[in-house]
Amino acid sequence: MVELITPYTFSQIPYLTYDSLDEYAEELIKDFAPELLHTPDALDVDRFIEYYLNLTVDYQRLCINRKILGVTVFNDGVLDIVCSETNQPQKIAVKAGTIILDPSLLTKRNIPRMRFTMLHEGSHWLLHRKAFAEDNPFVPVNTCEGQLIAAKTGRVDYSRSKKERTDTDRMERQADFLASAIIMNRSALRVAFKDFFSFYDEKPRRIIRDASPIDDTYAKLLPEYIAKTFNVSKRAALIRLEKLTAISDTRLSRA
């Protein structure tokens, strides 16, 4: 497994730009399945998590309202779950190196979301083990009981927001972006982007919303194509394309 080399904050949160996260993602893919850098295809997320990162995956209902879809266990401890039989709170022992996902993600319609959530939790493991080390006196606040676990809240894929009010906000943004960069690595995404325009016999170019009817059509069709190619949700594909400025708003392109 390729280890992350980067400076850290006083509380052991890595300093990382989007570019550095993209570069790290490509190093991981090159080590795990180098062919995926050149051939746009769906990543084998289960194999990446369980055999490459050596993490264990378990499924438990994490809260009544299913707001929490997944947790990453950094240290042995105890986790509160909802018992599937009684629908009541229950404590279970958990081991370091375990990803726990809500069973609702196992439905067919939620498979793209499950793949992303699993990678989000795997990204926490890759990026934030120092922050959750037992000897770190500055473990981030707003984490689960015992300050041992990072949680993925029930958002749809990942946020466009760049606001980081806390260390936890920063970790969530980093895990979201790295998960996206792994499942849709930049090199393969560039190939898929060119293939999309080749199908329409056009030269690849940035798509600008409201610039023309054809651009508006492409702004809808491209995320659908990318989502199908990489087996992700349309929203995840769209946000990835926006962050790489493959799709942008007219007002942004004129800035």
Image: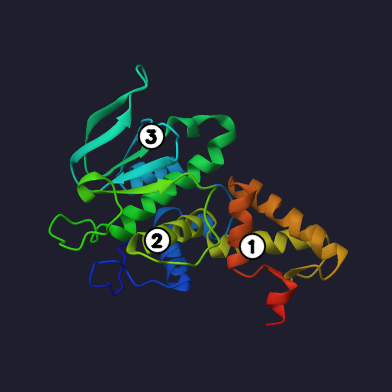
Where does the image place residue 2, in percent across and percent down from the top left?
Answer: 33, 61
| Numbered disc 1: secondary structure | helix
Q: Is the Cβ of the residue at disc 1 closer than 8 Å to that at disc 2?
A: no
In-image side of 163 versus 133 (left or right): right
Looking at this view, name the residue that lies furthest to the bottom: 255
Secondary structure beneath dot 2 equals helix
Dot 1 corresponds to which residue?
Answer: 191
Q: Residues within 10 Å of mark 3 (few under 14, many from 20)?
A: some
Could you say where residue 10 lies in the image, as x and y percent from the top left?
Answer: 23, 72
Judged from the image, the secondary structure of the residue bearing numbered disc 3 is loop
Q: Residue furthest left?
A: 135
Question: Disc 1 and disc 2: Cα gap in Å?
Answer: 32 Å
Residue drawn at x 35%, y 42% is 50
> What residue occupies the far top of the structure in this picture?
85
Q: Position of residue 243 (x, y in %)?
A: 58, 67
Q: Amino acid at mark 3?
A: Cys
